[in-house]
Image (tube, rainbow, N blue to C red):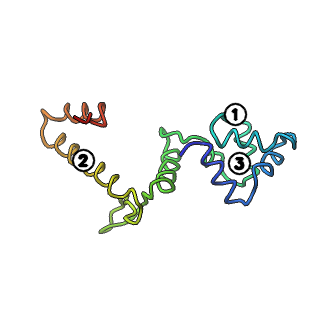
């Protein structure tokens, strides 16, 4: 999910129009909706000060709007939240162990399941055989494999 999609999702959750949000951010009334529409479409990216103000207006943490920083655990959590929203991937507990699960009711379940299954098989093969660990790294660097 990109920053524009997050802005739109949160704005709609708060029951605001693009114009409402733009005016609350201090944009002129005549162009307030246009500016927010540009953020949501991705034709403009809000600067950090706008993200901070938008977070206040929408009553969320700025990290809920900004692109996640995967180099931090908080950023990683926001990435997981995006995966849940976009692909239905969610946390679950099986036999006392936490895992990520796919939502079987989604129409893209089979395609995503097949991709993850192939990843798991390739990863296992790479770990089981010292000679093939380099092959696993190459597989990741050249994903998806070309179709012949």
Q: In which quarter of the image is residue 43?
A: top right
| Marks 2 and 1 in Cβ contact (< 8 Å) | no
Question: Mark 3 — residue?
Answer: 55
* Residue holding disc 2: 118
**CB of mark 1 within 8 Å of CB of mark 3?**
no
- In the rendering, at what x and y percent does residue 128 appear? 14, 43
| Distance between mark 2 and mark 3 Cα atoms | 39 Å
Please state which of the two labelled residues, at mark 2 or mark 1, is closer to the viewer: 2
Residue on which the image places disc 1: 47
The answer to whether residue 29 is left or right of residue 133 is right
Q: Where is residue 67 in the image (x, y as percent from the top left)?
A: 57, 40
- Could you say whether the residue bearing mark 3 is in a helix, strand or loop? helix
Instruction: Measure the alpha-carbon separation of dots 2 and 1.
Output: 39 Å
Mark 1: which secondary structure?
Answer: loop
Q: How crowded is mark 2: few (under 14 residues within 10 Å), some or many (20 or more)?
A: few
First in sequence, mark 2 or 1: give its number: 1
Q: Say which of 106 and 123 sits in front.
A: 106
> Mark 1 to mark 3: distance in Å?
12 Å
Instruction: Report x, y in % for residue 17.
Output: 76, 54
Q: Label 3: few (<14), some or many (≥20) within 10 Å? A: many
Residue 9, horizontal then vertical, whole percent: 63, 54
In primary-sequence order, the first of circles 1 and 3 is: 1
């Amino acid at each position: 999910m990109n920053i524009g999609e997050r802005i739109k999702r949160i704005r709609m959750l708060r029951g605001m129009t693009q114009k409402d949000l733009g005016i609350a951010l201090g944009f002129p009334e005549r162009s307030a909706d246009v500016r927010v529409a540009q953020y949501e479409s991705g034709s403009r990216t809000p600067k950090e000060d706008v993200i901070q103000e938008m977070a206040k207006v929408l009553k969320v943490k700025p990290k809920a709007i900004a692109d996640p920083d995967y180099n931090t655990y908080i950023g990683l959590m926001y990435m997981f939240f995006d995966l849940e929203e976009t692909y239905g991937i969610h946390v679950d507990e099986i036999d006392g162990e936490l895992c990520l699960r796919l939502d079987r009711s989604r129409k893209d379940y089979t395609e995503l399941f097949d991709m993850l299954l192939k990843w798991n098989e390739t990863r296992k093969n790479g770990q089981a055989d010292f000679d093939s660990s380099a092959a696993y790294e190459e597989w990741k660097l050249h994903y998806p494999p070309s179709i012949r």
